[in-house]
Amino acid sequence: MIELLRTPFRKRSAMELLYALAGLPLALPGFLYALIGPATSLAMTVVLLGIPLFVAIMRGARGLGAMYRGVARLLLDLRVASPPPRRSRVGVIGAWTGALADSTGWRALLYMVIKLPLALVTTVAAVIFWGYGVGLLSYPLWRLLPVADADEVPRPSVSGANGIFLGTVPSILATAAVGLVVLIAAPWVVRGLVQLDRLLVNGLLGATTLTERVRDLEQFRNQAVDDAAARLRRIERDLHDGTQARLVSLAMKIGLAKEEIAGANGPVDLAAARIAIDAAHQSAKAALVEVRDLARGIHPASLDRGLDAALATLAARSPVPVRLQVELRTRPAPAVATIAYYCVAELLTNIAKHSGAHHAQIRVSQNGERMQVQVTDDGEGGATRNGGTGLLGLAERVRSVDGHLQVDSPIGGPTVVDIDMPTHV
């Protein structure tokens, strides 16, 4: 009940009321544009002026659609993905056929046609409910307002239907009660009508599912190319600065040992030769470790035994105690398993470096054709995608296989990262 009483005074209700009142003035020009513009261009086609006019009208429809999306974003906080830009075609005929095939422009014109009657109903309902609600609720105050000298001009009686007079205390209180009910109902009525407008904006002014999918695929392709190029540069840098330097040092130390054993500078110094061979041995082992780490970074060998074995290896190497629980009915595709492995590895690294956690948990489960990976820790919390801990990169990597990553990390903890991905792509 308290929540119902607070609803008319919330910011959302005020913004929806403002959107409802602004809807009609914005809808009328758009309605006229959608009806008159294409008809005028069609009539002028016979004199060849209609073709450039129609192209301009379709571009204007896109601009008006962007304006309506901006109003919805400003007042309703409705985030709608912008449609892709129209692809220009060469020549007058190409521009005309491109405008004819511009589904974004046509959908914007359809929105402007539907918008006017909906905006009319929404505006009228908002004025009636909010106006009558405020008016009836404040009726007791009207009765207290002085209208003139009480001795010369009598206070007019207010009468309702069937000769019921609203001058008595019960009738005044009943009027205020009716006003309260209407005022409580007003934001919900407006919200329901505005919700219809939300659906229209989403369906007609935003990007279609197909265009969003194509855009995501193009973005993922670019990210995959950039990620592969960065990975190759990292491997080249590691080989050049790490492994190659180790091997050069190994060759030099073996050369020194050979010289000592050969006795080129005098008697054979077995102690010096042993020291040189020991140093070469240490360099060889260090080079092997670096090569092993580099190979693990390219493709973890433990993944060949399954995702559960690979995650068990990560948990065993983690400096923070990790509890692992894997419940998979089918083996995920190699690409999905690799992404899950690297995500868990990055999350465990973040836990060890930034969280201050004492315990962590990894839980992997399967629901139909989807796989859920959850990593939890009892650290300080406060992790965000833009916090410099690589979560944004993980989210983009998960999206490349039609998955999504969600972070819940309040200050003080705990931090829960949920990853949902398909088992096969």
Image (tube, rainbow, N blue to C red):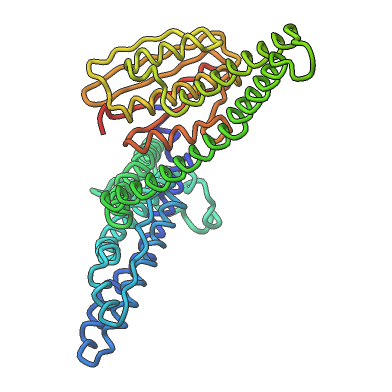
Which image quadrant is residue 113 in?
A: bottom left
Quadrant holding the C terminus: top left
Could you tell whether 291 is left or right of 167 in the image? right
Q: Residue at x 32, y 15 (%)?
A: 305
Residue 275 coordinates in the image, percent (x, y): 71, 10
Q: Residue at x 46, y 45 (%)?
A: 226
Residue 107 coordinates in the image, percent (x, y): 26, 62
Q: Residue at x 62, y 13 (%)?
A: 281
Could you tell whether 124 is left or right of 354 in the image? left
Could you tell whether 147 is left or right of 112 in the image? right
Q: Is residue 180 above or below residue 76?
A: above
Which image quadrant is residue 423 in?
A: top left
Foreground residue, 198 or 305?
A: 305
Foreground residue, 63 or 146?
A: 63
Q: Kindly tell me whether residue 192 is visible in this rendering.
A: yes
Foreground residue, 233 or 388?
A: 233
Quadrant holding the N terminus: top left
Q: Kindly tell me whether residue 29 is visible in this rendering.
A: no
* Residue found at the far bottom of this picture: 47
Q: Is residue 335 above or below residue 229?
A: above
Foreground residue, 402 or 317?
A: 317
* Residue found at the far right of this picture: 266
Could you tell whether 227 is left or right of 365 in the image? right
